[in-house]
Image (cartoon, rainbow, N blue to C red):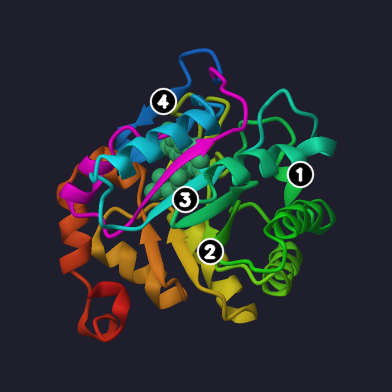
Amino acid sequence: MDKDGVALEAWEKLGFGFVEVGTVTALPQLGNPKPRLFRFPELGALINRMGFNNNGARSLAQRMEALQNSGKRPGIPIGINIGKSRVIPLESAHSDYLESFRLLYQHGDYIVLNVSSPNTPGLRDLQHVESLAKILGTLRDWEGGNASKPLLLKIAPDLAPKEITDIASLCEKEQLAGIIATNTTLDHSALRSNHHDEIGGLSGRPLQEKSTAVIRQLRDVTHLPIVGCGGIFSSANANEKFQAGANLVQIYTGFIYRGPALIREICSGLPYSCCGNSLTQ
Ligand SMILES: Cc1cc2nc3c(=O)[nH]c(=O)nc-3n(C[C@H](O)[C@H](O)[C@H](O)COP(=O)(O)O)c2cc1C
């Protein structure tokens, strides 16, 4: 939710083990007209069509640099999530991602390629392996054979099993550091007739099972680290993601409804079986 990295010091103080800023795009953009974020408290859900409102990759790079120079960069890992600028055609997506990647490379402890937001027209088409291979190839070429920065891919929960398998094998081939599963869903069936619908991505409780199922499918086909995300409202929900094969978890909607208490609850509520690895120490 911290598109432009304005609250990095606060995230660490609230108890997060790592934080991901963005999505930022190469070109600054306003995002979609408001209203663009809708609450459904009785469902524990949100629908958003923010549309990557952000000040652009260059501005984030400057902020990160200033933070570093002031000695106030948090000690926790900071990931930077990059997306495609809305006005750039899909055919040129690879150069647009490269622009953000280049500007932010040295500032992120890891970089996330976001090809799964439903709110930038056509963005999810970039999950097709041919498009994805072109983008990943462009980034790897720029790195010039010494790929040192952990690069992760964030995927949608609405993919078919074959697509998940194909994406996982491409990620292995390109030696990605992991896969983030998942972004919001376009399946609004949980809203049923008594709730008004809105255009956008649905997150929170209605996404919980769906994102866990994607993690499970991924774990069947890859040994890459998986970051589980989608409908985590409790340490039990976080543990379901770990049981399904996730190595780390992220929260958004649960944090909106439960507030900062959820962070420490998740970090302290894991069963002993999860405490032997470095993720929880
Ligand atoms: C208001 C809002 C804005 C979001 N913006 C982004 C974004 O810019 N980039 C991104 O990768 N995911 C974005 N997401 C998706 C979340 O990071 C997360 O993947 C998804 O909401 C599922 O997790 P949750 O159920 O815990 O919210 C956004 C979600 C919400 C609710």
Viewer-nearest of discs 3 and 2: 2
Residue at numbered disc 3:
207
Classify mark 4: helix, strand or loop.
strand
What residue sits 38% from the left and 62% below the top?
Answer: 249
118 lies above or below 155: above
| 3 in relation to 238, above or below | above
Give the left or right position of residue 249, taking residue 129 as reference. left
Q: Quadrant of residue 148?
A: bottom right
Q: Amino acid at mark 4?
A: Phe
The yes-or-no answer for disc 3 within 8 Å of ligand 1 is yes
Q: Earlier in the sequence, mark 3 or mark 2?
A: 2
Mark 1 = which residue?
Answer: 94
Give the SS element for disc 3: helix
Does label 2 point to a residue whose CB lies under 8 Å from ligand 1? Answer: no
3D distance between C-alphas at marks 2 and 1? 18 Å
Residue tagged 4:
38
Q: In the image, is residue 8 part of the stretch drawn in magenta?
A: yes
The three-letter amino acid code for the residue at tag 1 is His
| Left or right: where 40 falls relative to 145 | left
Specify whether 176 is left or right of 78. Answer: right
Packing grade of label 1 (10 A; few <14, some 14-19, many >=20) is many
Residue 86 or residue 195, whichever sits in front: 86
Residue 269: give x, y in percent of width and height.
18, 69
Would residue 191 be seen by someone viewing this image from the given angle? no
Give above or below for 102 relative to 209: above
**Residue labelled with disc 2:** 150
The range drawn in magenta is 1-30
Residue type for callout 2: Pro
Work out whether mark 1 precedes mark 3 in sequence or the reverse, and give the earlier one.
Answer: 1
| Residue at disc 4, CB closer than 8 Å to ligand 1 | no
| Between discs 4 and 3, the one toward the N terminus | 4
Q: Secondary structure at mark 1?
A: helix
